Amino acid sequence: FNPVRFAVGMKASFVARSTVGDREHLKEMIKEAKKHKGYALIDIFQPCVSFNKINTYQWYNKRVYKLEDHDPTDHAAAMKVADEFGDEIPIGIIYRQDKPTFRDRIPYLKDKALVDRDVEVADMEYLIKEFK
């Protein structure tokens, strides 16, 4: 399963990849994801030092490369980058699209989240009657 390809394919508005082997890069990806308004996915490579003796820090460090001349707003290019995995694995912001969030698209949610709204029992009375 390739979570990056899946997220880019579904046009998640922020998709990145990083590794714990490069703390500064990972920190930068987390900062960018936090700044992004909307859903953000970061695929983080973290070797299991107890049970996985193949995909080690050295294995990842030998293969990862930072995306330099990549346009993260180009969906087709992001799909190609998302498929790269093997001898060379890209890390960085793979896809970014500024678009209204779910909450921004629903006027009812603009002033107050559903969880913060008061629900009166009278509002549910018609539903309760259906199940009697």
Image (spheres, rainbow, N blue to C red):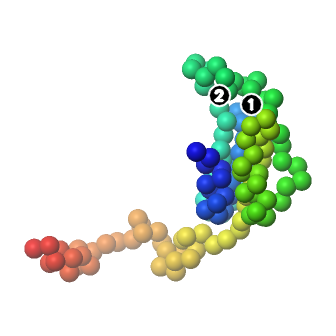
Q: Position of residue 74 (x, y in %)?
A: 79, 64
What residue is shown at x 55% (from left), y 70% (from top)?
Answer: 102
Look at the picture and state if 82 lies above or below 60.
below
Q: Can residue 111 be seen from the camera position used here?
A: no
Quadrant of the rendered image containing residue 44:
top right
Considering only order in the chain, which callout, 1 or 2, is on the residue closer to the N terminus? 2
Query: How far apart are the two marked residues, 2 and 1, measured between alpha carbons?
Result: 8 Å
Query: 131 left or right of 50?
Result: left
Q: Secondary structure at mark 2?
A: loop
Q: Amino acid at mark 2?
A: Pro
What residue is shown at x 54% (from left), y 71% (from top)?
Answer: 103
Query: Which residue carries the number 2 mark?
Result: 47
Exactly how many numbered labels are in the figure? 2
Q: Amino acid at mark 1?
A: Tyr
Quadrant of the rendered image containing residue 47:
top right
Crowding around mark 2 (Cα neighbors within 10 Å: few <14, some 14 to 19, many 20+) is some
What residue is shown at x 64% (from left), y 19% (from top)?
Answer: 53
Q: Position of residue 24 (x, y in %)?
A: 78, 37
Look at the picture and state if 56 lies above or below 2.
above
Split into 4 quadrants, where in the image is the C terminus? bottom left
Query: 75 left or right of 11?
Result: right
Crowding around mark 1 (Cα neighbors within 10 Å: few <14, some 14 to 19, many 20+) is many
Residue 60's tag is 1
Nearer to me, 77 or 132:
77
Question: Are circles 2 and 1 on residues that touch, CB within 8 Å?
Answer: yes
Look at the picture and state if 119 lies above or below 47.
below
